[in-house]
Image (tube, rainbow, N blue to C red):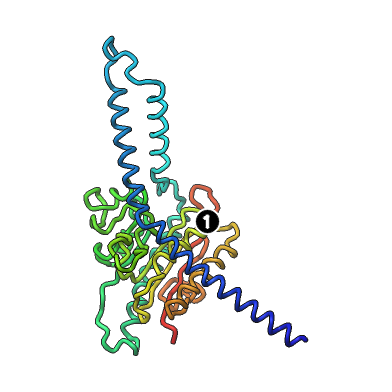
Amino acid sequence: ERRSSSHNDGDKSCSSKQSFEESLLASEESARQIRSGQAKQRFEKAVRREDRIAELEQKAALPRNEEHENIMSEAEVAELKGLLKVRENFEEQYDPLTFTKEHLEFKAMHNDALIALVRYCERTQSSSSLQQQYTKEVSNIFVLDGPDGGTTSALIDRGEFDANQCFVANRHILTCDALKLSGGGRLLEKNVVHATAAEALTMAADSANPGEGGALSNIDFRAYYFDGCGGFYPHIINMLSAALIREKFNVDKPIAVGYSLLGGNKNVVEKELAVSRALTIIARNRGMRMVHVLDDPVTYGISADIKKIGGSEGGGGGTFTTWHILEPER
């Protein structure tokens, strides 16, 4: 009876594992349907909003005289206030001027970790016995970055990567403008996408029409860094799924993956576990395995002093950041 019970428990555990895996993969399939065109719709809506704001502001600026008395109705005044409030909600909240010294040091150390992991992945692939015909390829790197371009600047200056290798997605148009060369930033116009990370990276829902995927969906990335901009870990899983669940990929190419969550001291164990489980499933789906880099940072060329939880932003709860490698299952 004990053996029978143990066997049944094992069946239930296996079934639960398969159910979670199937759920994750199915969720990405349905999410692709939603993301396809989502960025375009938001962009078109923003354009219409800005056009209407300009129209109403122009009307409000007309000189008040007998001819133009009460030129704006109460409804139009209320509409303008509402549109301006919506615009404000979509402006960048990231402000490096509010960061403490400890937080800036924490970010710098993790930028260095990203650089080290890209170089580690390059060395590992080039020395692999399965890569007899390997010729060095350019390492493309996807990151989420703020208007100061802190991470991309570190990649270019300290990592000595070319700006052409660095790609960013951001849903805030002003941040996108600030990151581009034309706006005083470091990145090429084509390397900055006005969209969420998931939108920019998601594959086309219909593989027969790859052009319907995100702007960066067909780029083969060596490394990804995702910033949750909050403590809601499902957003991280959504980005990981968009980036890594795909039909065609190089199973022998190691990939570095990192992410951050704000409020790093709250339920951090549960959140990290949920993301790790999802990333393990994604890796297995690719015929790879997931490694926790910070369990042994020195092996990957990262300082042994690196921490997962760093200084708070202006007195917040701290930031949690960690790194993983997806590598071939030997």
| Quarter of the image with the C terminus in it | bottom left
Residue ranking furthest to the top: 66
In the rendered picture of this protein, how many numbered marks are placed on residues? 1
Residue 211 position by quadrant:
bottom left
Left or right? Give the position of 43 relative to 286.
left
Q: Which amino acid does label 1 sit on?
A: Phe
Residue on which the image places disc 1: 232
How would you rate the neighbour count of disc 1 (Cα within 10 Å): few for under 14, some for 14-19, many for 20 or more?
Answer: few
In percent of the image, x 47 and y 61: which residue is there? 236
Q: Can residue 242 be seen in this view?
A: yes
The foreground one among 113 and 144 is 144
Q: Estimate the x, y position of residue 301 in percent, counting from the top left.
A: 40, 75
Q: Can residue 310 be seen in this view?
A: no
Left or right? Give the position of 178 relative to 84.
left
Q: Estimate the x, y position of residue 139 in percent, counting from the top left.
A: 29, 71
Secondary element under disc 1, as helix, strand or loop, is loop
Residue ranking furthest to the right: 1
In percent of the image, x 25 and y 62: which residue is there? 163
| Quarter of the image with the N terminus in it | bottom right
Q: Estimate the x, y position of residue 184 in percent, counting from the top left.
A: 24, 49
The foreground one among 23 and 184 is 23
